[in-house]
Image: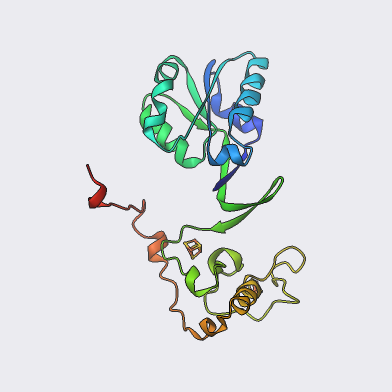
């Protein structure tokens, strides 16, 4: 899921400036699961804005990254001075696209695509590199789990399974790749000479796009 965290209130208020009527708009999917932008966080933020003397209305959509879910709030959006979106950056941009004449501000910092590690803990898992090679690495991503994003074996600096970048808090991703391949009996995959990553698949031609003619209406 996409993991996000809340912005400091000072930054949010700075964006809102003199806007009095604010639509506080949550997203009920990823950011709700990571307790950053769901119904509960919307209620808290709206209450804080009211305490500060603003008129805040609150809504939480099922998703803010799909236009169809915005239909129920079109009137509220038209009648407010600004929309404060508690979605990830994708949702904020969709909101701005749908309401081109309305100021739309982010209330969250979108952090990464990650895994829930337990109560109150998430870790980055995928960069969306566009060229997934997990099949070669036992399902452990070298791009995100190795501090140097190395795809051809460890750098040689790890100590007792920990990364030289921080031996106290960061596990060596390549140790994890090795352990996992050993467990599934596929250490032979380490003999694969993986071509240098083609970062153009990640960085070139932004925004990246996918078109599926077979799904086009
Ligand atoms: S290899 Fe790329 S797509 Fe696959 S998990 Fe890692 S960052 Fe994500
Ligand atoms: S110690 Fe391991 S995780 Fe850290 S940079 Fe080297 S190979 Fe990557």
Residue 78, picture quadrant: top left
| Point 40% across, 70% down: residue | 198
Is residue 216 depicted above or below 195 in this figure? above
Instruction: From the viewer's side, name the closer residue of 202 and 66.
Output: 66
Residue 169, picture quadrant: bottom right
Horizontal and vertical percent position of residue 44: 66, 25
Where on the image, by quarter, is ligand 2? bottom right
Q: How is the image coloured?
A: rainbow
Is residue 85 depicted above or below 131 in this figure? above
| Point 36% across, 60% down: residue | 204
- Horizontal placement of 213 versus 104: left or right? left
Horizontal and vertical percent position of residue 34: 62, 42
Horizontal and vertical percent position of residue 56: 57, 17
Q: Which image quadrant: the C terminus?
A: top left
- Horizontal placement of 140 versus 215: left or right? right
Q: In the orientation shown, which residue stands out farthest toward the front?
A: 184
| Point 58% across, 53% down: residue | 114
| Point 46% across, 29% down: residue | 104
Is residue 129 depicted above or below 211 in this figure? below
Horizontal and vertical percent position of residue 40: 63, 28
Is residue 125 depicted above or below 61 in this figure? below
Total number of numbered discs in the rendering: 0
Instruction: From the viewer's side, name the closer residue of 161 and 95.
Output: 161
């Amino acid at each position: 899921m996409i993991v996000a965290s809340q912005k400091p209130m000072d930054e949010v208020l700075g964006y809102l400036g003199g806007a009095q009527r604010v639509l506080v708009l949550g997203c009920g999917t990823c950011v709700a699961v990571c307790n950053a932008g769901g119904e509960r966080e919307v209620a808290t933020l709206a209450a804080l804005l009211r305490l500060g003397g603003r008129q805040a209305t609150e809504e939480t959509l099922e998703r803010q990254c799909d236009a169809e879910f915005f239909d129920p709030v079109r009137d509220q959006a038209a009648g407010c001075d600004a929309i404060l979106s508690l979605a990830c950056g994708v949702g904020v941009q969709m909101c701005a696209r749908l309401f081109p004449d309305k100021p739309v501000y982010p209330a969250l910092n979108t952090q990464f695509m990650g895994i829930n590690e337990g109560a109150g803990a998430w870790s980055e898992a995928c960069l969306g590199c566009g060229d997934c090679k997990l099949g070669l690495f036992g399902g452990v991503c070298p791009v995100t789990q190795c501090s140097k994003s190395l795809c051809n074996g460890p750098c040689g600096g790890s100590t007792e399974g920990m990364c030289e970048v921080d031996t106290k808090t960061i596990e060596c991703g390549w140790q994890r790749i090795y352990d996992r391949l050993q467990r599934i009996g596929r250490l032979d995959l380490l003999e694969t000479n993986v071509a240098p990553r083609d970062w153009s698949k990640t960085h070139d031609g932004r925004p990246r796009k996918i078109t599926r003619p077979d799904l086009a209406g």
